[in-house]
Image (cartoon, helix red, strand yellow):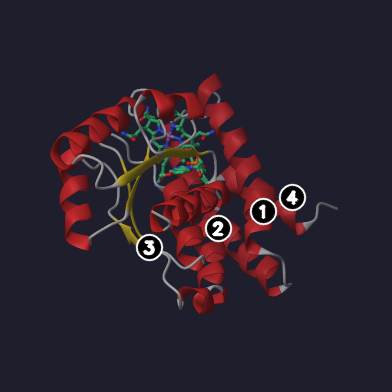
Protein backbone atom coordinates (compact mmCIF):
# COMPACT_ATOMS: atom_id res chain seq x y z
CA UNK A 1 0.00 0.00 0.00
CA UNK A 2 1.46 3.39 -0.89
CA UNK A 3 1.95 5.74 2.07
CA UNK A 4 0.46 9.26 2.16
CA UNK A 5 3.70 10.89 1.03
CA UNK A 6 3.76 8.75 -2.10
CA UNK A 7 0.04 9.33 -2.66
CA UNK A 8 0.54 13.09 -2.39
CA UNK A 9 3.43 12.98 -4.86
CA UNK A 10 1.21 11.04 -7.29
CA UNK A 11 -1.76 13.40 -6.80
CA UNK A 12 0.45 16.38 -7.77
CA UNK A 13 1.77 14.53 -10.82
CA UNK A 14 -1.85 13.72 -11.80
CA UNK A 15 -2.91 17.34 -11.24
CA UNK A 16 -5.58 16.16 -8.79
CA UNK A 17 -6.16 19.31 -6.74
CA UNK A 18 -8.77 17.91 -4.35
CA UNK A 19 -6.73 14.83 -3.37
CA UNK A 20 -3.65 17.07 -3.03
CA UNK A 21 -5.51 19.36 -0.63
CA UNK A 22 -6.89 16.48 1.44
CA UNK A 23 -3.57 14.62 1.70
CA UNK A 24 -1.57 17.79 2.47
CA UNK A 25 -3.91 18.63 5.32
CA UNK A 26 -3.87 15.05 6.62
CA UNK A 27 -0.07 14.88 6.49
CA UNK A 28 0.18 18.17 8.43
CA UNK A 29 -2.41 17.02 10.98
CA UNK A 30 -0.24 13.93 11.57
CA UNK A 31 2.55 16.28 12.65
CA UNK A 32 4.93 16.09 9.68
CA UNK A 33 7.48 18.83 9.16
CA UNK A 34 6.14 21.11 6.38
CA UNK A 35 9.50 21.91 4.73
CA UNK A 36 10.58 18.27 4.83
CA UNK A 37 7.28 17.27 3.22
CA UNK A 38 7.73 19.87 0.47
CA UNK A 39 11.20 18.46 -0.17
CA UNK A 40 10.04 14.84 -0.14
CA UNK A 41 6.74 15.23 -2.02
CA UNK A 42 6.54 18.40 -4.01
CA UNK A 43 10.09 18.54 -5.44
CA UNK A 44 10.10 14.96 -6.79
CA UNK A 45 6.63 15.56 -8.30
CA UNK A 46 7.86 18.78 -9.94
CA UNK A 47 10.80 16.87 -11.43
CA UNK A 48 8.50 14.21 -12.94
CA UNK A 49 6.05 16.80 -14.34
CA UNK A 50 8.88 18.90 -15.82
CA UNK A 51 10.43 15.81 -17.41
CA UNK A 52 7.11 14.66 -18.92
CA UNK A 53 6.50 18.14 -20.33
CA UNK A 54 10.00 18.22 -21.82
CA UNK A 55 9.49 14.79 -23.45
CA UNK A 56 6.11 15.85 -24.87
CA UNK A 57 4.24 13.32 -22.70
CA UNK A 58 2.49 16.20 -20.88
CA UNK A 59 0.98 19.19 -22.66
CA UNK A 60 0.29 22.64 -21.28
CA UNK A 61 -3.09 21.54 -19.85
CA UNK A 62 -1.48 18.80 -17.74
CA UNK A 63 1.35 21.15 -16.76
CA UNK A 64 -1.16 23.72 -15.55
CA UNK A 65 -3.23 21.18 -13.62
CA UNK A 66 -0.10 19.90 -11.87
CA UNK A 67 1.01 23.50 -11.22
CA UNK A 68 -2.33 24.22 -9.51
CA UNK A 69 -1.94 21.11 -7.37
CA UNK A 70 1.67 22.10 -6.51
CA UNK A 71 0.47 25.55 -5.49
CA UNK A 72 -2.24 24.10 -3.25
CA UNK A 73 0.30 21.85 -1.46
CA UNK A 74 2.97 24.57 -1.14
CA UNK A 75 0.36 27.09 0.12
CA UNK A 76 -0.89 24.67 2.79
CA UNK A 77 2.64 23.83 3.98
CA UNK A 78 3.95 27.42 3.87
CA UNK A 79 0.91 28.72 5.78
CA UNK A 80 1.84 26.30 8.53
CA UNK A 81 5.49 27.45 8.41
CA UNK A 82 4.39 31.11 8.65
CA UNK A 83 2.17 30.48 11.66
CA UNK A 84 4.95 28.57 13.42
CA UNK A 85 7.50 31.27 12.60
CA UNK A 86 5.57 34.23 14.01
CA UNK A 87 7.74 34.54 17.12
CA UNK A 88 10.96 34.85 15.12
CA UNK A 89 9.57 37.96 13.43
CA UNK A 90 10.12 40.06 16.56
CA UNK A 91 13.67 41.10 15.72
CA UNK A 92 13.46 42.27 12.15
CA UNK A 93 16.58 41.37 10.25
CA UNK A 94 16.01 43.55 7.19
CA UNK A 95 13.70 44.22 4.27
CA UNK A 96 13.73 42.10 1.14
CA UNK A 97 11.83 42.82 -2.04
CA UNK A 98 11.20 39.69 -4.10
CA UNK A 99 9.80 39.20 -7.57
CA UNK A 100 9.98 37.18 -10.78
CA UNK A 101 11.52 38.94 -13.77
CA UNK A 102 9.78 40.23 -16.91
CA UNK A 103 8.34 37.59 -19.23
CA UNK A 104 8.28 34.94 -16.51
CA UNK A 105 5.15 33.93 -14.58
CA UNK A 106 6.67 31.10 -12.52
CA UNK A 107 6.12 32.00 -8.88
CA UNK A 108 5.84 28.85 -6.77
CA UNK A 109 9.57 28.77 -5.91
CA UNK A 110 9.71 32.50 -5.29
CA UNK A 111 6.72 32.21 -2.93
CA UNK A 112 8.50 29.50 -1.01
CA UNK A 113 11.63 31.67 -0.72
CA UNK A 114 9.41 34.54 0.52
CA UNK A 115 7.80 32.38 3.22
CA UNK A 116 11.11 31.00 4.47
CA UNK A 117 12.59 34.49 4.71
CA UNK A 118 9.48 35.75 6.48
CA UNK A 119 9.58 33.01 9.10
CA UNK A 120 13.25 33.83 9.64
CA UNK A 121 12.47 37.40 10.67
CA UNK A 122 12.81 39.37 7.43
CA UNK A 123 10.25 41.91 6.25
CA UNK A 124 9.21 40.59 2.88
CA UNK A 125 7.57 42.49 0.06
CA UNK A 126 6.50 40.14 -2.68
CA UNK A 127 6.13 42.29 -5.78
CA UNK A 128 4.75 39.38 -7.82
CA UNK A 129 5.76 38.15 -11.26
CA UNK A 130 6.51 39.45 -14.76
CA UNK A 131 8.23 42.56 -13.38
CA UNK A 132 10.24 45.01 -15.46
CA UNK A 133 13.49 46.55 -14.17
CA UNK A 134 11.62 49.84 -13.60
CA UNK A 135 8.94 48.08 -11.53
CA UNK A 136 11.58 46.37 -9.38
CA UNK A 137 13.30 49.68 -8.69
CA UNK A 138 10.08 51.61 -8.00
CA UNK A 139 8.94 48.97 -5.49
CA UNK A 140 12.38 48.76 -3.83
CA UNK A 141 12.38 52.55 -3.36
CA UNK A 142 8.80 52.49 -2.03
CA UNK A 143 9.46 49.88 0.64
CA UNK A 144 13.00 51.05 1.38
CA UNK A 145 14.41 47.59 0.74
CA UNK A 146 17.83 46.42 1.85
CA UNK A 147 17.94 43.53 -0.60
CA UNK A 148 16.26 42.84 -3.94
CA UNK A 149 15.72 39.22 -5.01
CA UNK A 150 15.19 38.32 -8.66
CA UNK A 151 13.72 34.94 -9.53
CA UNK A 152 13.80 33.46 -13.06
CA UNK A 153 12.76 29.98 -14.13
CA UNK A 154 13.57 29.94 -17.82
CA UNK A 155 16.80 30.15 -19.78
CA UNK A 156 15.47 33.09 -21.80
CA UNK A 157 14.15 35.04 -18.82
CA UNK A 158 17.31 34.62 -16.74
CA UNK A 159 18.78 37.18 -19.16
CA UNK A 160 16.31 39.67 -17.64
CA UNK A 161 18.13 39.30 -14.35
CA UNK A 162 21.18 40.86 -16.01
CA UNK A 163 19.09 43.70 -17.48
CA UNK A 164 17.46 44.39 -14.12
CA UNK A 165 20.77 44.45 -12.25
CA UNK A 166 22.36 46.74 -14.86
CA UNK A 167 19.37 49.10 -14.70
CA UNK A 168 19.34 49.28 -10.89
CA UNK A 169 23.12 49.79 -10.75
CA UNK A 170 22.83 52.60 -13.32
CA UNK A 171 20.09 54.34 -11.35
CA UNK A 172 21.13 53.69 -7.73
CA UNK A 173 24.73 52.43 -7.81
CA UNK A 174 25.27 49.86 -5.05
CA UNK A 175 22.44 51.09 -2.82
CA UNK A 176 20.63 47.75 -2.97
CA UNK A 177 22.17 44.32 -2.58
CA UNK A 178 20.76 42.17 -5.38
CA UNK A 179 20.48 38.39 -5.25
CA UNK A 180 19.33 35.98 -7.93
CA UNK A 181 17.91 32.46 -8.03
CA UNK A 182 15.74 30.04 -9.98
CA UNK A 183 16.32 26.63 -11.53
CA UNK A 184 18.45 27.62 -14.59
CA UNK A 185 20.71 30.01 -12.64
CA UNK A 186 24.12 29.21 -11.12
CA UNK A 187 26.76 30.81 -8.93
CA UNK A 188 28.79 31.47 -12.09
CA UNK A 189 25.84 33.23 -13.72
CA UNK A 190 25.31 35.39 -10.62
CA UNK A 191 28.97 36.43 -10.68
CA UNK A 192 28.86 37.12 -14.42
CA UNK A 193 25.91 39.51 -14.13
CA UNK A 194 27.21 41.33 -11.04
CA UNK A 195 24.72 39.98 -8.49
CA UNK A 196 25.67 40.13 -4.81
CA UNK A 197 24.68 36.53 -4.28
CA UNK A 198 22.97 33.39 -5.54
CA UNK A 199 21.05 30.62 -3.82
CA UNK A 200 19.96 27.25 -5.22
CA UNK A 201 16.94 26.86 -2.92
CA UNK A 202 14.84 28.54 -0.25
CA UNK A 203 16.89 27.55 2.85
CA UNK A 204 20.13 28.71 1.17
CA UNK A 205 18.41 31.96 0.15
CA UNK A 206 17.71 32.60 3.85
CA UNK A 207 21.35 31.90 4.75
CA UNK A 208 22.46 34.21 1.93
CA UNK A 209 20.35 37.21 3.01
CA UNK A 210 21.37 36.73 6.66
CA UNK A 211 24.99 36.77 5.59
CA UNK A 212 24.57 39.88 3.42
CA UNK A 213 22.79 41.72 6.24
CA UNK A 214 25.44 40.74 8.80
CA UNK A 215 28.19 41.97 6.48
CA UNK A 216 26.44 45.29 5.82
CA UNK A 217 25.72 45.93 9.52
CA UNK A 218 29.36 45.26 10.46
CA UNK A 219 30.48 48.06 8.09
CO1 LIG B 1 6.78 26.21 -16.78
N1 LIG B 1 8.54 25.74 -17.49
N2 LIG B 1 6.35 27.12 -18.45
N3 LIG B 1 5.05 26.48 -15.98
N4 LIG B 1 7.31 24.97 -15.45
C1 LIG B 1 9.47 25.06 -16.58
C2 LIG B 1 10.31 26.07 -15.79
C3 LIG B 1 10.33 24.19 -17.59
C4 LIG B 1 11.75 23.85 -17.06
C5 LIG B 1 9.53 22.90 -17.96
C6 LIG B 1 10.29 22.02 -18.92
O1 LIG B 1 10.30 22.27 -20.10
N5 LIG B 1 10.94 20.98 -18.42
C7 LIG B 1 10.31 25.10 -18.87
C8 LIG B 1 11.47 26.11 -18.99
C9 LIG B 1 12.52 25.65 -19.97
C10 LIG B 1 13.70 26.54 -19.95
O2 LIG B 1 13.65 27.67 -20.27
N6 LIG B 1 14.82 25.98 -19.57
C11 LIG B 1 8.96 25.77 -18.75
C12 LIG B 1 8.25 26.37 -19.84
C13 LIG B 1 8.92 26.21 -21.20
C14 LIG B 1 7.03 27.04 -19.67
C15 LIG B 1 6.17 27.74 -20.75
C16 LIG B 1 6.96 28.54 -21.81
C17 LIG B 1 5.27 26.65 -21.39
C18 LIG B 1 4.45 27.14 -22.57
O3 LIG B 1 3.65 28.04 -22.44
N7 LIG B 1 4.71 26.55 -23.70
C19 LIG B 1 5.28 28.67 -19.89
C20 LIG B 1 5.98 30.01 -19.63
C21 LIG B 1 5.07 31.06 -19.15
C22 LIG B 1 5.86 32.32 -18.77
O4 LIG B 1 6.48 32.35 -17.71
N8 LIG B 1 5.84 33.32 -19.63
C23 LIG B 1 5.22 27.88 -18.61
C24 LIG B 1 4.14 27.95 -17.73
C25 LIG B 1 4.04 27.25 -16.54
C26 LIG B 1 2.79 27.24 -15.66
C27 LIG B 1 2.03 28.56 -15.63
C28 LIG B 1 1.87 26.14 -16.18
C29 LIG B 1 3.39 26.75 -14.28
C30 LIG B 1 3.77 27.88 -13.32
C31 LIG B 1 2.67 28.17 -12.30
C32 LIG B 1 3.05 29.19 -11.27
O5 LIG B 1 4.22 29.38 -10.89
N9 LIG B 1 2.04 29.85 -10.78
C33 LIG B 1 4.68 26.05 -14.75
C34 LIG B 1 5.40 25.10 -13.95
C35 LIG B 1 4.75 24.71 -12.65
C36 LIG B 1 6.66 24.57 -14.34
C37 LIG B 1 7.51 23.48 -13.65
C38 LIG B 1 6.85 22.13 -13.94
C39 LIG B 1 7.70 23.64 -12.16
C40 LIG B 1 8.24 25.00 -11.67
C41 LIG B 1 8.08 25.07 -10.16
O6 LIG B 1 7.13 25.66 -9.66
N10 LIG B 1 8.97 24.38 -9.43
C42 LIG B 1 8.90 23.64 -14.38
C43 LIG B 1 9.66 22.34 -14.54
C44 LIG B 1 10.68 22.10 -13.44
O7 LIG B 1 11.05 22.97 -12.70
N11 LIG B 1 11.17 20.89 -13.43
C45 LIG B 1 8.56 24.45 -15.57
C46 LIG B 1 8.83 24.22 -7.96
C47 LIG B 1 9.59 25.30 -7.22
C48 LIG B 1 9.47 25.02 -5.72
O8 LIG B 1 10.93 25.23 -7.60
O9 LIG B 1 10.71 27.32 -8.98
O10 LIG B 1 12.86 25.93 -9.06
P1 LIG B 1 11.68 26.44 -8.31
O11 LIG B 1 12.23 27.29 -7.04
C49 LIG B 1 13.26 26.81 -6.18
C50 LIG B 1 14.67 27.23 -6.63
O12 LIG B 1 14.80 27.42 -8.01
C51 LIG B 1 14.98 28.43 -5.82
O13 LIG B 1 14.30 28.18 -4.60
C52 LIG B 1 13.04 27.57 -4.87
C53 LIG B 1 12.60 26.75 -3.69
O14 LIG B 1 13.60 25.85 -3.27
N12 LIG B 1 14.59 29.76 -6.24
C54 LIG B 1 15.26 30.85 -5.75
C55 LIG B 1 13.61 30.21 -7.04
N13 LIG B 1 13.62 31.53 -7.11
C56 LIG B 1 14.60 31.97 -6.31
C57 LIG B 1 15.03 33.25 -6.01
C58 LIG B 1 16.11 33.39 -5.14
C59 LIG B 1 16.76 32.28 -4.61
C60 LIG B 1 16.34 31.01 -4.89
O15 LIG B 1 16.61 34.58 -4.78
C61 LIG B 1 16.01 35.74 -5.28
- Report the residue marked by disc 4: 6
- Report the residue marked by disc 1: 8
Q: Quadrant of residue 127?
A: bottom left
Q: Residues within 10 Å of mark 3 (few under 14, many from 20)?
A: some
- Quote the CA–CA distance across marks 2 and 3: 28 Å
- Quote the CA–CA distance across marks 3 and 1: 35 Å
Question: Residue at horizontal 72%, vertical 66%?
Answer: 32
Closer-to-camera residue (21/177): 177
Q: Is residue 203 visible?
A: yes
Question: Secondary structure beneath disc 1?
Answer: helix
Q: Residues within 10 Å of mark 4 (few under 14, many from 20)?
A: few
Q: Residues within 10 Å of mark 2 (few under 14, many from 20)?
A: many
Q: Quadrant of residue 161?
A: top left
- Report the residue marked by disc 3: 94
Q: Quadrant of residue 28?
A: bottom right
- Quote the CA–CA distance across marks 1 and 2: 9 Å
Residues at discs 1 and 4 in contact (Cβ within 8 Å): yes
For marks 4 and 2, the one nearer the N-term is 4
Q: Give ligand 1's quarter of the image.
A: top left
Residues at discs 1 and 2 in contact (Cβ within 8 Å): yes
Does 9 appear above or below 102?
A: below
Amino acid sequence: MPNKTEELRQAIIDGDEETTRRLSEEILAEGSDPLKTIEECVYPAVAVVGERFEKGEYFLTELMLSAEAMKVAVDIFTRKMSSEGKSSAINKRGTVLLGTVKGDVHEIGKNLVATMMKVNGFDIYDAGKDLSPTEFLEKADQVNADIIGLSALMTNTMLRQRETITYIHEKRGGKYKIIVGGAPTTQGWAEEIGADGWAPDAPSAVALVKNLQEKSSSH
